[in-house]
């Protein structure tokens, strides 16, 4: 843990950077390492100085890169900065659940302080930090602090003021807790790695692929693609060089189930990757870990080290961690691959799909953390056992990250096919009016839909489940989600780049009731354009999200009697979803 | 109609194509037209402007990134797509500063020409009035980032046709902006020269030549007298520093 950041003399800085490179990249820096190098520099020095950029230019082995291109990469990622660092850097999570828990007040306290002491403290906002069950949350110099309240914020400011080295701060501040409301087979599963791998080896890749097919496992990241089909495509793809990538970039606001799996089911996940490598013939694996989960890096690295020592992963198949740098769009698998190659995370044109043209143009399987855990479960207990839970179309179970207006926010593992109502009862959501299932890119559902089953055929979800009671107003949800999409749009295609910004502006006007029918119509038209013309899923789901919220809002306005004007909504507490 | 040849239906007209061609390539080769700004036949495919959205069955696809398939039924000239493209154009106008009456490229601008083509009268979306940095440091070429549509034609042309690497994009989302790959970030410090393709392919008035502008009278310029679906996307020599046009 690094902090406070210090302003270093040019020569000191240069030496420190060279030491950093020598330590982490003894064999030299290649183009594909670029984002990792930038993340390391950012984490160590708090910013990417021109000295650092020049050092990178000099150190690059395989290609020249101009300063402009380097800046283009840095400016793409929220957690990389080109301006000098304050001693302490705070990123406040701006997800709707953080705002509902009082983040606005903390934003004001912290920015007031930072305005007086800009060289000491810098405060920015970030999208969801994956701590919604214990929000409001922030990242301090990259490390999470959850359960913010005025006292804890004061405690943070006192430590900032005293400029204590970060490792001397009370460790309790940085505690991230795990709340599991209900366990299922994935969370209960304790695999014996040796036994599982022996079994895979004895039955062979093709047999296991058949088993996987029988299981009907669908990807748990949100898209629900058939896992066996994906693996089969990659297995059939030409070329000796293949990759397995675990997508641990869970950026969908309200999702934190992968964090919990990384904390508690890491072995199963790595094992799943190992099995995948066996089946598709890959020699290398990567865990693309979102930067917000930097605090899990030592835990992951020590697990990988243990696997290596036990010979479970080896020269034949090694796994490395690749850190993100703050870009929701990199959860999209082709943007993730671009990012892994050290570039701006712009989604690729598909086809070709990663199974034939993935990392460095080689066949690649990209699966979610939870998917790999399920693979190990199937390898251990078989397809028949797996299919005992869930529905015919959606076998197995699903982890839901529950946050918002309920008594027991946390992780709920439920068989596919369980209803929204069942989930709400488990988490003690007594006065629930709306749920946002699958995050902003999912579905906004009201009471009349609570009997619907949660599965890939009905209400599909990547794992985010946010609960809203009667006091919450649709325009505030809309504004928060639209600001999120505008902040996270990669800017590549016209509808998403322009449309998400227009929607964010319009939603702000809607929050203050400064809209008329023409504006509502405009919002619908923008949403429709996004849905039909966007380059990737981000733009499409942004349009879908806006459309659903406006639909609900219009219904609400039509039934004026329901207008909860007596309820203090969050509109008064936050002037905008983005806080700033 | 030989059964061996590959063809697809484009608004009911049979278009022949060779394997691997996109819908856009096949249509342009066949003498047809689909609105576009970021596509250029000599450059790698981009797919960012989204103006070439066509309909295949109930799917909306960008014609420049979609491979033609035998027997495909592609719809192009339908009111639904006209409306979609109009909205995309209005978004482009809203996010930049496109002061057509005084722009050097007026009358020869592909963005403006498509607005004419689609009958755009105004932008229904609130104008954003960006204030990005302009760059007048180069001897012959001027850069106005507020007129840039992020199509990366100059980025690609510099790399793929000129063998240089003058441009790239920086930032993200609505902060995305054209960036110059020189040490001081200025166009004048690059190896860009006036004859470079990258300086002559900008479809809008973002990269303009400093000399020789306003040489033609209004009503005599390319898109005053022709519609873009007939001429194709062109930037005439008169607004390209007098250097020959780089045809489609």
Image: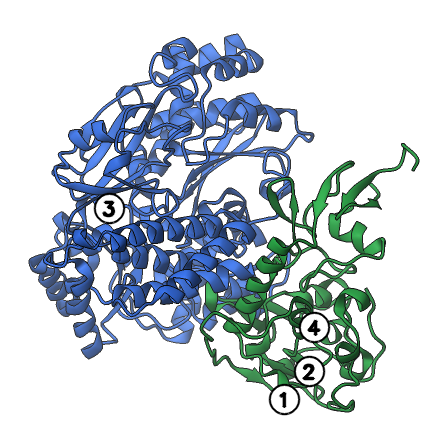
Chain colours: A blue, B green
Marks 2,4: beta carbons within 8 A: no
Q: CA distance from mark 2 to mark 4?
A: 9 Å
Assess disc 3: are there few (<14), some (14-19) or many (≥20) residues with their C-alpha within 10 Å of its C-alpha. Answer: many
Query: Chain under label 2?
Result: B
Q: CA distance from mark 4 to mark 3?
A: 50 Å
Which residue is tagged 2?
Answer: B106
Residue A63 drawn at (x, y percent)? 64, 58
Q: Nearer the viewer, residue A62 or A515?
A: A515
Q: Find the residue positioned furthest to the left.
A: A151
Query: Chain under label 4?
Result: B
Which residue is depicted at the point 69% across and 68% down?
B117
Which SS class for mark 1?
helix
Which residue is depicted at the point 67% across and 72% down?
B116
Which SS class for mark 3?
loop
Image-quadrant location for residue B58:
top right
Image-quadrant location for residue A6:
bottom left
């Amino acid at each position: 843990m690094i902090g406070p950041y210090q302003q270093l003399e040019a020569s000191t800085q240069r030496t420190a950077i060279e030491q950093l490179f020598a330590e982490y990249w003894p064999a030299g820096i290649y183009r594909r390492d670029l984002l990792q190098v930038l993340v390391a520099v950012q984490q160590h020095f708090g910013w990417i100085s021109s000295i650092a950029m020049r050092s990178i230019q000099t150190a690059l082995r395989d290609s020249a890169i101009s300063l402009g291109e380097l800046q283009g990469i840095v400016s793409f990622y929220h957690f990389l900065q080109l301006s000098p660092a304050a001693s302490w850097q705070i990123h406040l999570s701006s997800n709707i659940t953080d705002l509902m828990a009082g983040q606005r007040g903390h934003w004001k306290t912290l920015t007031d302080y930072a305005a007086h002491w800009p060289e000491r403290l810098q405060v920015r906002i970030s999208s969801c930090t994956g701590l919604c069950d214990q929000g409001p949350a922030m990242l301090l110099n990259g490390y999470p602090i959850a359960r913010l309240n005025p006292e804890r914020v004061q405690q943070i400011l006192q430590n900032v003021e005293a400029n204590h080295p970060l490792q001397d701060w009370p460790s309790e501040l940085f505690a991230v807790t795990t709340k599991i409301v209900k366990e299922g087979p994935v969370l209960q599963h304790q695999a014996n790695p040796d036994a599982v791998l022996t079994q895979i080896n004895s039955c062979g890749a093709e047999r296991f692929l058949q088993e996987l097919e029988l299981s009907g496992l669908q990807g748990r990241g949100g898209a629900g693609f058939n896992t066996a089909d994906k693996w089969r495509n990659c297995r059939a793809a030409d070329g000796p060089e293949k990759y397995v990538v675990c997508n641990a970039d869970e950026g969908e606001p309200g999702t934190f189930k992968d964090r919990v799996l990384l904390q508690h089911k890491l072995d199963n996940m790595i094992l799943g990757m190992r099995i995948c490598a066996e089946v598709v013939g890959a020699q290398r694996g990567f865990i693309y870990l979102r930067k917000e989960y930097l605090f899990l890096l030592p835990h992951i690295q020590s697990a990988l080290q243990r696997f290596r020592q036990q010979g479970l992963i080896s020269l034949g198949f090694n796994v490395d961690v690749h850190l993100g740098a703050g870009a929701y769009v990199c959860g999209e698998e082709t943007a993730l691959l671009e990012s892994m190659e050290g570039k701006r995370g712009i989604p690729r044109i598909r086809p070709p799909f990663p199974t034939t043209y993935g990392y460095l143009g080689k066949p690649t399987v990209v699966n979610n953390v939870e998917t790999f855990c399920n693979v190990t479960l199937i390898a251990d207990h078989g397809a028949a056992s797996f299919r005992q839970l869930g529905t015919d179309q959606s076998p197995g179970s699903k982890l839901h990250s529950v946050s918002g207006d309920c008594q027991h926010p946390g992780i709920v593992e439920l068989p596919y096919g369980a209803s929204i109502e069942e989930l709400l009862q488990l988490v003690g959501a007594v006065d629930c009016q709306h749920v946002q299932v699958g995050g902003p890119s999912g579905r906004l559902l009201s009471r009349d839909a609570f009997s619907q089953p949660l599965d890939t055929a009905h209400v599909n979800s990547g794992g985010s489940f946010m609960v809203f009671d009667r006091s919450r107003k649709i325009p505030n949800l809309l504004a928060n989600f639209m600001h999120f999409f505008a902040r996270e749009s990669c800017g590549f295609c016209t509808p998403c780049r322009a449309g998400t910004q227009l929607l964010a502006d319009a939603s702000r006007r809607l929050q203050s009731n400064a809209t008329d029918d023409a504006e509502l119509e405009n919002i619908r038209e923008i949403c429709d354009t996004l849905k039909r013309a966007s380059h990737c899923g981000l733009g499409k789901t942004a349009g879908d999200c806006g459309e659903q919220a406006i639909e609900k809002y219009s219904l609400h306005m039509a039934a004026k009697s329901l207008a909860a004007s007596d309820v203090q909504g969050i509109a008064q507490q936050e002037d905008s979803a983005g806080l700033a | 109609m030989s059964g061996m040849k590959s063809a697809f239906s484009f608004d009911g007209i049979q278009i022949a194509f060779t394997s691997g061609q996109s819908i856009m390539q096949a249509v342009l080769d066949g003498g047809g037209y689909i609105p576009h700004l970021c596509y250029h036949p000599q450059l790698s495919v981009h797919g960012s402007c989204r103006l070439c959205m066509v309909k295949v069955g109930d799917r909306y696809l960008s014609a420049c990134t979609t491979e033609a398939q035998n027997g495909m039924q592609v719809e192009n000239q339908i009111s639904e797509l006209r409306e979609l493209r109009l909205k995309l154009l209005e978004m482009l106008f809203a996010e930049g500063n496109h002061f057509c009456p005084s722009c050097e490229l007026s009358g020869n601008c592909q963005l403006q020409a498509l607005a004419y083509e689609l009958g755009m009268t105004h932008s229904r979306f609130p104008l954003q009035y960006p204030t990005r940095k302009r760059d007048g440091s180069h001897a012959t070429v001027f850069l106005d980032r507020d007129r840039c549509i992020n199509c990366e034609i100059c980025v690609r042309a510099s790399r793929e046709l000129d063998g240089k690497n003058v441009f790239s994009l920086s930032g993200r989302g609505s902060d995305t902006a054209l960036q110059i790959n020189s040490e001081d970030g200025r166009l004048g410090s690059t190896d860009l020269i006036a004859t470079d393709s990258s300086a002559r392919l900008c479809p809008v008035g973002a990269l303009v030549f400093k000399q020789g502008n306003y040489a033609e009278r209004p009503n005599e310029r390319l898109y005053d007298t022709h519609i873009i679906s007939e001429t194709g996307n062109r930037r005439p020599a008169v607004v390209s520093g007098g250097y020959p046009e780089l045809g489609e």
